[in-house]
Amino acid sequence: MPESVYKVIELIGTSKESFEKAAVTALDRAGKTLRDLRVAEVVKLDMQLDAKGKIEAYRVKLNVSFKFED
């Protein structure tokens, strides 16, 4: 296997429906501008709450790696 270098970035995706949809939202958006996405690691899950404590949005923080090109 040839030597490779990968870059890791942090993304935060949000959804009003679920954590899974929040992650998919972030990855779909990243895939529009980045090529060769390799690994997505969930770093943190949290929820945005309204003044009454009801869930407004699910949020997922991801570390995403992709192949670094010259």
Image (tube, helix red, strand yellow):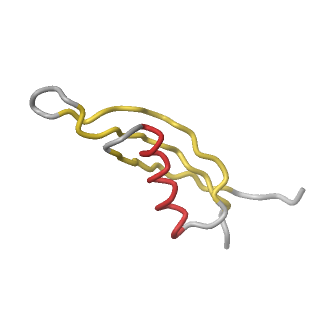
Q: Nearer the viewer, residue 2 or 56?
A: 56
Q: Position of residue 28 (x, y in %)?
A: 50, 59
Residue located 52% across and 45% down the image: 63
Left of 30 or right of it: where is 46?
A: left
Which residue is at the far right? 1
Q: Position of residue 33 (x, y in %)?
A: 52, 70
Please count the marks in the image: 0
Residue 15 lies, with reference to residue 31, above or below; the image says: above
Residue 67 lies, with reference to residue 23, above or below; the image says: below
Q: Nearer the viewer, residue 55 or 42?
A: 55
Rendered image quadrant of residue 70: bottom right
Which residue is at the far top? 53
Left of 43 or right of it: where is 12?
A: left
Residue located 44% across and 50% down the image: 11
Residue 63 lies, with reference to residue 30, above or below; the image says: above
Residue located 60% across and 56% down the image: 7
Q: Position of residue 8 (x, y in %)?
A: 57, 51
Residue located 66% across and 55% down the image: 6
Q: Nearer the viewer, residue 22 or 9?
A: 22
Rendered image quadrant of residue 61: top left
Instruction: Classify the position of the N terminus by image quarter.
Output: bottom right
Q: Position of residue 32 (x, y in %)?
A: 52, 69
Rendered image quadrant of residue 18: top left
Which residue is at the far left? 51
